[in-house]
Amino acid sequence: MKNILLKQRKERDELMSRPYLLRRNVQDTDLLLNSNLIKLITGPRRVGKSTQALLMLRDKNFAYLNFDNYPLLEAWDANLVMRMLDDVYPGYEYILLDEVQNLDAWDLWVSELYRMGKNLVIAGSNAKMLSSEMATVLTGKYLQVEMLPFSLEEFFDWNKLDLHKLEPEQKTESLVLTDDYLRNGGYPEVVASRRLTRSYLDTLFDSIIWKDVAKRHNVRNVTDLNNLAMYLVSNFCNPVSANELTTELGFSSVNTTKKYMDYLREPYLFYYLSRYNKFKLMKKAPRKVYVVDNGFVASKAFSLSENLGRLLENQVFIELIRRGYDVERSMFYYRSRNDKEIDFVLREGVRILRLVQVCYDMSSPKTEKREVDSIIECAEELKCNNLVIVTYQDKRTIEKDGYRIEVVPITEF
């Protein structure tokens, strides 16, 4: 066991020696680490959760256990491991547990460590397994930090440009980068090598379907599961319902479709946005489907023709998720009584904070009229005056019918 831990220490030190982009997080790292609560870092596969944990602990004395490691799992002995940690990491202050969900009964062991007073940082990939099970076993004993692929802001950081301080001579480069991000997304592994984007994300998508979904839930009909995933990624930003999907894909039952949809949400692959209305109607109305990263669309969707508007909408959605809006409580889409649609209704409690519409190009008077009429009609019904239309690069203010609408480019939004 000591040899296994020594090898992992060498792995930890090698990982820490690499250069990394410091992610822009809303959380205060020192505040997190000074808390005795468990620090739980969750998110999709390969977005940098382990890296973030290492960066958080870089200047600290910490022990490291990586459970994505067969020898450790095969030789597992909790008491022996804790004794060996004292030998390998003398005087450690924190323990970093990476992919701990691979360990049987991991939640009970983590609970025991917490009772022993260990200061824990945990990184893992499965949303439901890591959040709901932690909530059950360790209610009120952990803080959750959610990681997503690079934001546009971080993508600019990687390319050594400050999104908020662009010089006039950098405008062309910024447009190129914005278009690149829109089409290819922000997965850390491929931002430095765009030629690998499609093949890498194609493989990653399949890995999530097989490892995080089919294997975990013992799905027998993986073909149906994969067909549903492919349908959703090809119909991103569109409303879907379990009844329609069951008929469209020829599934055996609506319950199976609902179950598969939930499975695909767990590993942060898809999000489902409800319609804002009375509660019963919200539950019955179709939900709009979004993908965690635009790169998956490029690698998996059947066609990319005329998708720029939807890619921009998906990008805005993920940015709102990154800011802490939640599809269950604080973010919805809306349709007016005359069937005018607004992409995002943002609220806090019962108060509507903002209406956000997304339109790639509003240079056409017809398009502008359609988008402006929609947001004003919805604003009247929802009693909201904070209105914004996000575009690719248009910036101006529109005043109509007593409403002021800010039109902003994605780089400013």
Image (tube, rainbow, N blue to C red):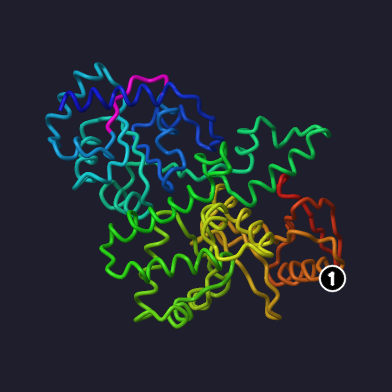
Q: Position of residue 160 (x, y in %)?
A: 66, 30
Where is residue 141 shown, x and y percent of the image?
32, 42
Position in image of residue 225 (x %, y %):
38, 68
Specify whether residue 63 is painted magenta: yes
Which residue is painted at 66% across and 46% down in the image?
A: 180
* Mark 1 crowdedness (10 Å alpha carbons): few <14, some 14-19, many ≥20: few
Residue 201 among those drawn in magenta: no
67 left or right, relative to 382: left
Q: Residue at x 76, y 34 (%)?
A: 166
Nearer to the camera, 15 or 132: 15
Instruction: Please identify the quadrant where the N terminus is shown.
Output: top left
Q: Nearer the viewer, residue 58 or 231?
A: 231
Q: Which residues are magenta?
A: 58-65
Quadrant in which residue 276 is drawn: bottom right
Looking at the image, which residue is at 53% across and 36% down? 25
Q: Amino acid at mark 1?
A: Lys
Above or below 380: residue 204: above
Residue extending furthest toward the top: 90
Tag 1 residue = 366
Residue 401: quarter of image: bottom right
Where residue 219 appears, x then y in whole percent?
Answer: 29, 66
Secondary element at image label 1: helix
Residue sitting at x 74%, y 53%: 392
Instruction: Say whether residue 265 is left or right of residue 236.
Output: left
